Image (cartoon, rainbow, N blue to C red):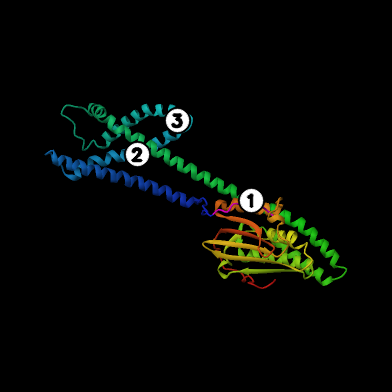
Amino acid sequence: MPQPSADTASPLRRPRLLRPGRIARRQYGLILGAFGAATTLALLIAVENYLAYQRMGRPKSLLEVIAHELPVWYVWLAVTPGIFWLARRLPVAGERRWRNLVLHLPLSAGTVFVTLVMITIVKAPVLQRPPGMSYLEALLHEYGRIFAVIMPIYFVILAVAHAVDSYRENEARARREAELGTLLERAQRDLLRMQLQPHFLFNTLHAVSALMERDVPAARRMLTRLSDLLRMALDDDSRHEVSVEEEIEFLDRYAEIQKIRFGGRLAVTYDVAADARRLLLPRLVLQPLVENAITHGLSRLERPGSVTVEARRRNGHLVLRVLDDGVGLEGGALTREGVGIGNTRARLEQLYGAGHRFAIGNLPEGGCEVRIEIPAGTEERTPSAPARNGAPS
């Protein structure tokens, strides 16, 4: 049995994975949001300019001022994808951030000039220029006048591009980590199944061989239970979590075989609360705990022994307890952790991180307790037959 692990109670936080359709909707939402932001900014500046004209004694209609401002910000919106592209090619983060930042200075000047050309073309119908001044002269004059004022817009967009790319990179990394975590969990579960099959198969077949000489019906029952158990263990189910009911159903097949082996000297009891039956837990997480209790806690007893499996919903967590009345832990702790228990601990850490608790220790009245607390997730499908509650199996 393992050493008690440090109990932690911080909430489970799993990365949210976005489906392709949801990603497309998010992109459309970003486009609409950018268009709305540009329009809102143009309207706010137009109102400010309208009031300024009023104060200066040169009143203009609000629609006229808006007609001058909207093209400016729509043009900036049009060049934003180009700035985003430059931000990806010359990121202002990483080893070359200072070199890239210097390169962005002439690029910003060129972008501002191109933007002013586009604004001039778009605003040509409403553009007012001094008499005798061509559009090119008016453009160069305007460029020199407001260059220093509007160039920061380039760097604001550059900063937004960097923030968006960082967010997408973090989101993609979270998806990759989640996928790798799922693959690792499946690999660990498959490893547990491979460990269960030969180890348990050999022990059971040995017990069947011994029973054939003195109790043929019991040997046949054991073979039937073994067949059911292996069929369930080999079931190609991609889910890494199942309901408490399903886990108890699998565990019951295992317990039936052990009870036949012990010849009536073993009792296994399930105490599952009604509101915990459909909660989710990792597949094959209880069997190693019960096997550990039987092998290390009860097998050395001269008297009959018992194992109790409890499941409760408490404070947003599923609380699982495996209790036995065996010899307990020598000295209150165990120096070596078995493969099954170590695998269980690693799986819980991989699945729930700091959102779980795993502890083991002696009971005051004798025997041992293994306790697991994981976030309470509810299965969404119709439950199977109810788990037996409070009666020996």
Q: Is residue 295 above or below residue 126?
A: below
Q: Counting residues from the N terminus, which is met first, the one under dot 2 or under dot 3?
A: 2
Quickly name the residue at label 3: 97
Left or right relative to 131: residue 258: right
What separation in Å lies between label 1 and label 3 (alpha carbons)? Answer: 40 Å
Q: Amino acid at mark 1?
A: Ala
Look at the image and say whether residue 233 sits in the magenta stretch.
no
The stretch in magenta equals 1-8
Residue 78 is tagged as: 2
Q: Position of residue 294 (x, y in %)?
A: 73, 62
Q: Amino acid at mark 2?
A: Ala
Q: Counting residues from the N terminus, which is met first, the one under dot 1 or under dot 3?
A: 3
Q: Residue at x 27, y 40 (%)?
A: 71
- Identify the residue at the far left of this view: 57
Q: Residue at x 64, y 51 (%)?
A: 346
Left or right relative to 12: residue 331: right
Q: Position of residue 270 (x, y in %)?
A: 65, 69
Q: Position of residue 372 (x, y in %)?
A: 61, 58
Q: Position of residue 306 (x, y in %)?
A: 71, 67
Secondary structure under the numbered disc 3 in the rendered image: helix
Q: Quadrant of residue 205?
A: bottom right
Residue closer to the observer: 139 or 265:
265
